[in-house]
Amino acid sequence: MTGVASQSMEIIDGDAIPDEARRLHQQGRMAGQQGDYDRALELLDRAHAEAPGWAYPVYDAAFTYLLKGDIVAAERLYTKVDRMEPRGFFTCKTTLDVLRRELSGALPDGLAHAFVMLEFLQDEEEKKAILQGVVSRFPGFAQAWRELSDLLEDPDDRLYAIERGLDGDPDHETRGQLMLNKALLVHRRGDREQAMEILTLLALDPDSTLSTVSLANATITQVLPR
């Protein structure tokens, strides 16, 4: 189960998360890591009952269903997380979009699970080769282009992958990551003005996730100052 809770996630609607909810959530995560998915789902459901406004147990339950291969249940719970945290929650928007592409038939059965599992592949060359194969078969798969762009060394190749990802109608989370990387690339090429324009638009865009806004502002102040 991916993601680490930030300090801000320890508060829901001004109230501290109950200790019992946190305990059940942690036990659920441990069960999931041990491969006991049914037990994990039971504990995560109980954690959610203790803290209905806390998205984390729902998010981990969605991921657990994805690991089990139940993409319908996974999509339902990722949708719930997205409603609870509309400005983004870890990789929720990205995974939800990939699931919906698979459910619509735009991607083949099993690709959402395989794509998520790439996160745990340590061999970057192997990962790059897999992603290159994926985008050659599914050139509109924006999220795969984004992952591939991070593994490419040549700036021209990276920019090409970024542009292909942007052409693939990415979710807001993926779009933000692609645009942030594009801004850094054009800045390295000496075009500070275009980089600043990209970052400013991201920071002001109401559709940007909170993490995108934070990274855009940080890049403006820490990377691009004159």
Image (cartoon, grey):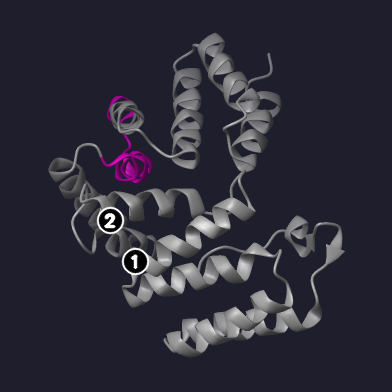
- Category of crowding for the residue at label 2, using alpha-carbon neighbours closer than 10 angstroms: few (below 14), some (14–19), many (at least 20): some
Check if residue 84 falls in the magenta segment. Answer: no
- Residue sitting nearer the eye, 98 or 212: 98
- Residue sitting nearer the eye, 85 or 29: 85
- Category of crowding for the residue at label 1, using alpha-carbon neighbours closer than 10 angstroms: few (below 14), some (14–19), many (at least 20): many
The residue under label 1 is 71
Secondary structure mostly taken by the magenta-highlighted segment of the chain: helix
Residue drawn at the location 38% of the way across and 42% of the way down:
150
The image quadrant that residue 199 belongs to is: top right
Which SS class for mark 2?
helix
Residue 152 place in picture, x, y as percent: 31, 39
Residue 23 place in picture, x, y as percent: 71, 84
Distance, label 2 to label 1, CA atoms, is 8 Å
- Residue sitting nearer the eye, 8 or 190: 8
Instruction: Choose the circle earlier in sequence order: 2 or 1.
Output: 1
Identify which amino acid the numbered label 1 is placed on.
Ile
Q: Is residue 145 left or right of residue 14?
A: left
The residue under label 2 is 103
Residue drawn at the location 28% of the way across and 27% of the way down:
160
Q: Which range of residues does the magenta coloring cover? A: 141-157
The answer to whether the residue labelled 2 contacts the one labelled 1, judged by CB atoms less than 8 Å apart, is yes
Which SS class for mark 1?
helix
Q: Is residue 10 left or right of residue 178?
A: right
The quarter of the picture where the C terminus appears is: top right
Q: Which mark is residue 159?
A: none
